[in-house]
Amino acid sequence: MNTLLTKARGGLMMGVAASALVLSGVVAHAETIRWARVGDALTLDPHSQNEGPTHTLNHHIYETLVGRDDDGELTPRLATEWGISEDDENVWVFTIREGVMFHDGSEMTVDDVVFSINRARTTPSGMAALHAAVEEVTAVDDTTVHVRMSGPAPLYVQNLTNTFIMSQAWAEENGVEVAPDFAAGEEAHSVRNTNGTGPYRLVERDPEVRTVLQVFEDHWDDAPEVTEIIYTPISEAATRVAALLSGEGDIVQDVPVQDIARLEQTEGISVVRGPENRNIFFSYDMTSESLASSDAEGNPFASPEVREAMSLAVDRNAIRQVVMRGESQPSAAPLPPFVNGWTEEMHAFDDPDLERARELMAEAGYGDGFTVQLDCPNDRSLNDESICQSLVGMMAQIGINVDLNAQTRSLHFPLIENWETDFYLLGWGVPTFDSQYVFDFLVHTREGSYGSFNGSRYSNPELDAKIEALATMTDLEERDALIAEIWDEVMEERIFLNIHNQVLAYAMRDGINLDVHPENQPHMATVTFD
Amino acid sequence: MIAFILRRIVQSVIVMLTVAIVAFALFRFVGDPVASMVGQETTLAERAEIRQALGLNDPFPVQFFNFVTRAVQGDFGVSYRLQQPVMELILSRLPATLELALVSGVLAFFFGVGFGVYTALRRGNWLSGSIMTISLIGVSLPTFLIGVLLIWVFAVELQWLPSFGRGDTVYIGDWWRTGLLTESGRASLILPAITLGLYQMTLIMRLVRAEMLEVLRTDYIKFARARGLSNRAVNFGHALKNTLVPVITITGLQMGSIIAFSIITETVFQWPGVGALFIRSVQFVDVPVMAAYLMLIALVFVVINLIVDLLYYAVDPRLRVDRSSARG
């Protein structure tokens, strides 16, 4: 990472910083990308962790059957074709690409695909929940794999965009036939060693310091323009930005919102933006008899008038302007815009109407207001604590006296899990790009694998039945109609008080072209140079 | 002497056990590690299973006893976050922290003593005045701010030095990775070392200055001058030597703080040491790493205290006399 710097001291670029930087970026470093973001991949094991930065790095080394492009659409990767079997609606058929090589020189076969999906769905793999409906994976011939589901699963392929294919022989040789166990007493070989089919192979891995990848010559696809990637996590925002400004980095992810405008005005640096698959909302306990943290008679959140009053008191545009410095998409829809089921109608919201809100509070019998505690994470989403702080002011205007409890995420999330919070902020992404995911985890009554993040305690058996039906509906038109029906009910009940969708920004030196990926998984093989 | 050391070692073990108990009691308030270990799709039942498998549901005494029995065998478990054995993880990060601490400690000591002596001898001249003023800034600005300021001036504006990281490193032996032997490694060390050592340097400087002013007023210095000894012999041979006992105490104890509180400097400069490892582990509730780190820091303080006690013997003959006469 310091080769450029050595040159700088050698006098190549002294003094004429900005313009010389651009020059050397294009001429001397056309092929190496120095990439910085806030945190490192937790592990290089392809199935151990279902976590964003881990997947992002692994996507360079390993490949999935299907990929997701910058528009959120599925693209062929190791599978060239996929679809539900014509003979049996419970079976997914994948045609596997031929002539794909692993980094160790062996050829990928259908057996490797079968092995990988089985490894991914076996605990302690972090990916198991995405494959819970899989019953059996079989190789039918040299290019076809069948995945038998426990019932019709029309959207299963959407769950495969982060399930990587690894070599069975390599896994067996190194004793990593199953994903590493948290409770196991030793480090698995696959944590710091890899053997994938991806466009880059691992050259150096120093966790949390630096990871070097080099282009894999025998990759099946067109050779990427970037031939070497030096990946460095820099946790401190000011240092991360400084690394870009000083010419020690080429692409910086996780740009703090307060720096975006300044970086855009800096010569030699450009910023790209795009919507992220992540929306920020508030929710509340709308079912309990009374609230633990409130002085109110009964449960004010159980009253539809109070929930409506709260939504009328929220000024989403003010939060965008003041807290997010213009870097967010205010929306009333509790899901990101590219997710199946999103509508313009759900997204629209009115300007705050405090008079009407106060009337509604009085109608509900809370004209004198009430107190309640708001639980908020302070290190999970962009400016989460500040969003909560501004909500405190807005709620005060209609007499709701909010006591803010902002804390680290490891203390915040158990509150939702254990139903110990009356009122909370949550950020949510939809990796399957389908509304069912939101319903399963946030709307369905908490039971079994459903409703684990349903902190509102909302429970509606009729709605539950509809949500469960979604999973096996194969007529997609009918299914979309049912999704719209469920959303109508959810919006009507105001289970969520949505604030905005997050916007992603990547900063890079001029001359580098990289688009924002909705799942925040930029791929360096897609980078082009001017 | 041996009895003295043995007594100190027994005390040290008690200190370490106390630290372990306090640390373990605190971990209950850091939050739930499982929340950061699994994806959002994981069911509540699976979360409960992981918690059970990790022993997080065991009563406090059981968890503590398990930890201590394994720790005395050198086994601190596997990091929840990085899935590597904790001992290996800490040992691989320790050289970075020790090199940074050592370099900034040495810088702080030499510049601190040098400036301290100078400002004591040349009171009232403009250079002393400016050194004193600058040192005031050094103690009053937070480390974080100093680090960011240095990065801004020397990395972004002047582009003389790297803004983050440790540069290229080479191995000495099997596991000690040093940045001292490469050019980029040394360049990377400068800004963090200044950031980390500035406060210590100011402290030492002010201490030396105050002690020197005190000593220079004493009779034996006047007699030394009356004997016609050179300024050099008086100032350094007699005055400075007699100010060093408190200075060594402070420097020694500060050495522990430098290692323990390098957390902020390491975070600002993305320095791959144990401090940065610790802070990330706290965010992730990586209990095995936090426990091992706190034990390590306790060990560092205990060892440094022991060394400082032994150094007193070497520097101050009165302590030796007292002890032998007390025994005799």
Image (cartoon, coloured by chain):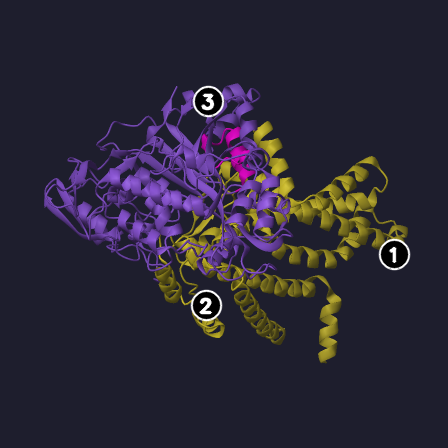
Chain colours: A purple, B yellow
Foreground pick, B165 / A121: A121
Q: How many labels, in total?
A: 3
Q: Position of residue A214 (x, y in %)?
A: 32, 34
Q: Position of residue A485 (x, y in %)?
A: 34, 43
Q: Which residues are magenta?
A: A236-257
Subunit that carries the residue with mark 1: B
Q: Is residue A231 magenta?
A: no
Foreground pick, A236 / B172: A236
Q: Mark number for residue A449? A: none
Q: Residue furthest bottom?
A: B328
Quarter the C terminus of chain A occupies? top left
Subunit that carries the residue with mark 3: A
| Circle 1 Cα neighbour tier, 10 Å, few/some/many (<14 / 14–19 / ≥20) | few
Which residue is under mark 2? B71
**Residue at (70, 57) in percent of width and height:** B250
Q: Is residue A284 visible?
A: yes
Q: Is residue B227 above or below residue A357?
A: below
Which comes before the other along the chain, label 1 or label 2? 2
Same chain assignment for discs 3 and 2:
no
Q: Position of residue A66 (x, y in %)?
A: 25, 38
State which mark lies toward you, 1 or 2.
Answer: 2
Kind of residue indicated by mark 1: Thr
Q: Position of residue A183 (x, y in %)?
A: 36, 62
Which residue is under mark 1? B218
**Rounded to the nearest whole Å, what is the CA distance between mark 1 and mark 2?**
53 Å
Kind of residue indicated by mark 3: Asp
Question: Circle 3 sits in a helix, a strand or a loop, which is it?
Answer: loop
Same chain assignment for discs 3 and 1:
no
Q: Mark number for residue A510? A: 3
